[in-house]
Image (cartoon, rainbow, N blue to C red):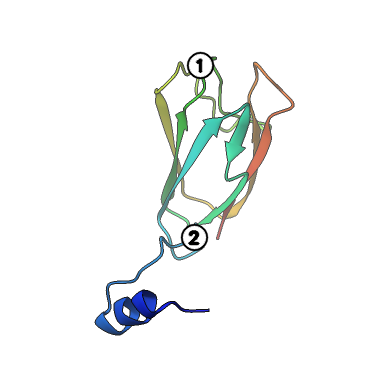
Amino acid sequence: MKTPLMAVLAVCGTLAAAPPATAQNATATIEIKDFDFHPMDVTIAAGGSVTWKNRDGEPHTVTSTDGFFRSGALDQDESFTQKFDRPGIYNYLCSVHPKMRATVTVK
C-alpha cells in the first residue's frame, strides 16, 4: 500500500530502493556482524567484486572452501575485496568461526 508521500515521490522519480545484489550488479557489499554474513547469499556479474566489512568486535576471515581466496584476519571495521572473473558458485566461511558460512554466485 502506497502512502500519499510515497505516491508523490514515485511520480517525481525520487523514490528508489537500493538494488539487490543481482547478476546485473558488478559489485556487492557484505557486512560481517553478529557472527554472520549479511546477506548470506549474493549474485554478481562475472568481472565484478565483493567487499566484506567486519562490523563485529571479534576478528573474522573470509575464506573460500575451495582455496580460491582468503582474507586473513579482519579486525573490527576492516574490509576485504575479492574480484570474481569466472561464473560459478563460491562457498566461503570464517576460518576462525567455521559455522559462519555463505555463498557468492557469479553469472
Where residue 3 sits: x, y (%)?
A: 43, 77
| Picture mark count | 2
Q: Is residue 49 above or below residue 101?
A: below
| Image location (x, y in percent) of residue 79 | 41, 28
Q: Nearer the viewer, residue 49 or 37?
A: 37
- Rendering coords of residue 29 (x, y %): 44, 44
Say what amino acid the circle numbered 2 marks: Pro
Residue position marked by numbered label 1 in the rendering: 57
Please give the residue where the numbered disc 2 appears in the rendered image.
20
Q: Of 51 and 59, which appears nearest the observer?
A: 59
Q: Position of residue 2 (x, y in %)?
A: 47, 79
Q: Secondary structure at mark 1?
A: loop
User: Residue 98 vs residue 67: left or right?
Assistant: right
- Seen from the viewer's position, the closer of residues 98 and 90 is 98
Residue kind at label 1, given as amino acid type: Gly
Say whether residue 104 is visible.
no
Please name the residue shown 33% across and 71% down the image.
15
In the image, residue 79 sits, relative to residue 49, either above or below, namely above
Q: Is residue 74 left or right of residue 5?
A: right
Residue at the image position 55 percent from the left and 30 percent from the top: 33
Residue at image location 34% in from the left, 75% down from the top = 5
- Give the answer, above or below, for where 7 lies relative to 101: below
Farthest residue in the right direction? 99
Q: Residues within 10 Å of mark 1 (few under 14, many from 20)?
A: few
